[in-house]
Amino acid sequence: MTIDRFLQHRASSWMTNEGEHADIAMSTRIRLARNLDDFRFPYVFSADEALKIDKEVSAALLDYGEELGHRFAHIDIQELTHLQKEILVEKHLISPYLAQSEHPGSVLLSEDEDLSIMINEEDHLRIQSLQPGFQLQEAYERANQLDSMLEKNLNYAFHEEYGYLTSCPTNTGTGMRASVMLHLPALTMSHQINRIIPAISRLGMAVRGIYGEGSEALGNVYQISNQLTLGKSESDILEDLQSMTEQIIEQEQKMREAIRSRSPISLEDRIYRSLGTLMYARLLTTEEAATCLSDVRLGIDLQLIDDVDMSILNELMIFMQPAFLQQFTGEQLQPKERDHARAELFRKRLRQEKSINHTEGEDHV
Amino acid sequence: MICDQCKERQASVLVKQHIQGQMIERHLCHVCAAKNTGFELLSEQDPLSINQLLAHWFPGGNASVNRVKQEETVCPSCSLTFSRFLKLGKFGCATCYEAFAPQLGEVMGRLHNGKTRHEGKVPASFGQTLAIRRQVEELRKQMKHSIEQEEFEEAAKLRDEVKALTLQLEGGASHDD
């Protein structure tokens, strides 16, 4: 497997529209932080140590990975161009931190891009498992299985009292960060989200907007995750996050119903205007595209729009970002040209989608 | 002074925030300050960066203030000092956890809602040794009790068990069957 495979304009398996509550929960992620006992942590280690760690971890995985039924590709970060790194970041396959890192590091990626290990990020190993929809248990099982296989061949830094030792004390213990990406347009429109966020942070969990800075979450997409890692077992962390997420989903559903019954015409108007914008606009900024995507997504959930496939929207959320656009057009783009290319991408993709659905002759009610 | 957030531009605004009962001060440039109005998060990564929290909780750890003091805890393995740890918000290696042990309980407790002891997964290989070590601890307690009760026969039996288990620990693998 070469790097090209992962740079293609192709959706990862976790971007599909499957899994429980897929209308509101877009994807689930589990991250496990692990370090090797015999080397210093990435903040202070030498390039030589970094190389040895990379070798050791890659060997452990590539030799035994077959047992898990996955094939992994080893991608050396230092060998990538700036654009290639950006694309992997936009696809959530590596972190911005790893992309910018100056010491040797790499990523081991499974074929379908739902399992990965970043080597020499903030910790020696960052095991990551991605699943579509709301699937905390499933995502954890897969990460845990990979971790258990690796621990047989690697000497993990583990402490009787503190558990898994990590660079940052906020990860010490289980080293686990579990998160669910949620699309919450109704809670955002009604400003309910501003009440929910502080309440959740008091319970050892965090909700934050992703893809955006400041208070406004770009495209109404939020991420809820656990903040505590010490003194709480993996299963307890997952259970608490599960029930908190379920509550938020329920609130969002209730609020959607409320908005729909209170002002159905304004809601429909907004949704169809956004669909129109995405299908016909000639210039689209990231913000406008994200807002419209959110509306169209809501329109599909509310069964107002039935000829656009939801997974196309998940894909477009990723592919509308700067590095992907640059690859799409094959040239360096100025911001204005980017907005032009983005609009073209949306037109093409949505038209294609609509014509496919029509030729398949789907029944319209 | 450089902006605490973008780490690029000159800081021109001092932002004071009450967070979880703590007053946090941040020096921001005009661009970052404008982005950060109200309650929202200061960066995509952390609601509040770990080193800011640590520096605030343990002001004594500030290196510039304490430079004259000689009694600085240093990790013997990676030579990270405790004050540098507070400043970075990151450990340098696994040994740091041992080296900073006296102060670490408080750091962990603050970060993890008062919890300082790991619950959850234990690597299989570590789990075996851990189980034996806990067993030895328990046997030693019983042995002490037996001696106090002057049950010397029982104490001797326990002593032999401890010995066998300790040997097993030192030998690494168990020699059963």
Image (spheres, coloured by chain):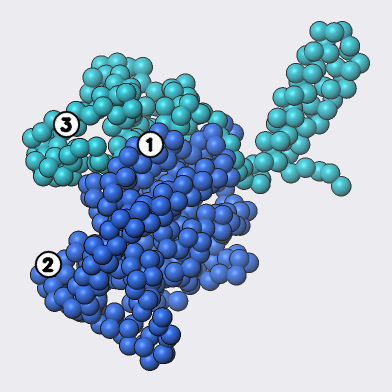
Which SS class for mark 3?
A: strand
Q: Is residue A182 left or right of residue B170?
A: left
Measured as percent of width and height from the top left, residue A195 is found at 32, 39
* Residue labelled with disc 2: A335
- Inspect the image, locate mark 1, and give the three-letter code of the amino acid beneath it: Ala
Q: Are marks 3 and 1 on the same chain?
A: no
Picture disc at residue A199:
1
The chain identifier of the residue carrying mark 2 reads A
* Residue labelled with disc 3: B15
Q: Is residue A98 above or below residue A279?
A: above
Q: CA distance from mark 2 to mark 3?
A: 32 Å
> Can residue A309 be seen at all in this image of the molecule?
yes
Measured as percent of width and height from the top left, residue A289 is found at 22, 66
Determine which quarter of the picture holds residue A140.
bottom right
Between marks 3 and 1 in the image, the one whose residue lies nearer the viewer: 1
Please state, as top left, top right, bottom left or bottom right, where the N terminus of chain A lies in the image.
bottom left
Q: Is residue A127 above or below residue B92?
A: below
